Amino acid sequence: MPAPQHFTPREMIEKLVSYDTTSHLSNLELIAFVETYLGSHGIASRRVMNEEGTKANLFATLGDETQAGGIVLSGHTDVVPVEGQDWSSDPFSIVEKNGRLFGRGTSDMKSFIAIALAFVPEFLKGGPKIPVHFALSYDEEVGCLGVRPMIENIIRDLPKPQVVIVGEPSSMKDVNAHKGIQSYQTTVTGLEFHSSQTHLGVSAIQHAAELISFLMKLAEEMRERGDSSSRFSPPYTTINVGTIKGGTALNIIPKTCSFLWEYRSLPDADPAEIITRFNKHAEETVLPRMQAVFPGAKIETVTRAQSPGLAALDGDPGETLVMKLAQCNSAEAVSYNTEAGLFQLADIPTVVCGPGDIAQAHKPDEFVELSQIRECETFMRRLADYVSGRSI
């Protein structure tokens, strides 16, 4: 067996950030590095590959994986693109400045993974009495896609964990609730004609605009309903139309128009309500008027991504542990979405707690404060004490 590898948290962050794991690329180099690192400590890893064999989840256990009540440290290895962003330095090389580490993924969310990995020797000291599981996923940034088969494996192969800690940037605060997300692409197909003959053509853009207007009315309705828990910001389900594309020229009635849209629903809301009402309006109100002129007109909506919200489970022992580790007196709710909702959907207690601020995620010159790194190190040190049977 090779000599055990040791990295400081800072060194491990530098290593993980150096791998360009943008979602449209492979993450296998990073996964291979983690496998080798864990293997040097006698820890076996299991890959869960995608169908193409280009990406992998990684699952590994420190301690007895047949023991119930383990702690799962979960994080996604993919990052969002840097193309078109004005970075002051190489996004995939760490730069320290003014008490911050700059680099893609420093906040979202390689720092959490790196610090957890750097603490492997601490977790192993004396043999952990409570197992620690690493669950590293791919394709979180494009719809929480990769983690799903890994969760299925956890449910099938392992006793129920005590808690899953998803290390998304939460400023090291305990987050026990977040919104769900549903995203769609709607394509409207009309009939091209000369723009002087509007009565003979069917404008895809015009009818797409009607559909978008309907979404905005729904958005206002959601705003008026509000959030009964008063925990979220903004305190209501939101709807956003992100892109729109259509038409050929000014003097041609447009044949096609497509738009991407999403809604982020409160965790206690019916996740199907908005898409159901949208489809009903499209099929019963807009489409008949289109087909009265051109029977071949169509409105097609396809799902791009769906990920459930995270609902608060007040008093859950797993959350109580995380609050103790993070030295938090209360839990928070956030409006961004994570893989936590999928773990909870599988009946595994889950919370979000990790270093960094979500406000820095996806931006050029993404950074994490060094103070957040230190807080996460303290969190992991307390966790090492806990799984070893020492008081925290």
Image (spheres, helix red, strand yellow):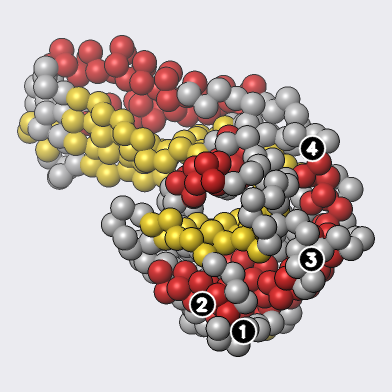
- Would you say 311 lies left or right of 14 here? right
Image quadrant where residue 108 sits: bottom right
- Residue 36 got which mark? 2
Cα separation, mark 4 vs mark 3, equals 21 Å
Quadrant location of the N terminus? bottom right
Answer above or below: position of 202 versus 342.
Answer: above
Q: Residue at x 27, y 44 (%)?
A: 245
Residue most extreme to the right:
391
Label 1 Cα neighbours within 10 Å, binned few <14 / some 14-19 / many ≥20:
few
Q: Position of residue 139 (x, y in %)?
A: 44, 55
- Does the CB distance between marks 1 and 4 fall below 8 Å? no
* Mark 1 lies on residue: 5
- The secondary structure type at the circle numbered 3 is helix
Q: Earlier in the sequence, mark 4 or mark 3?
A: 4
Front-lying residue, 61 or 369: 61
* Mark 4 lies on residue: 316
* Mark 3 lies on residue: 384
Q: What's under tag 4, amino acid-wise? A: Asp
Answer above or below: position of 311 versus 150.
Answer: above
- Does the CB distance between marks 2 and 1 fall below 8 Å? yes
Q: Earlier in the sequence, mark 1 or mark 4?
A: 1
Q: What's under tag 2, amino acid-wise? A: Thr
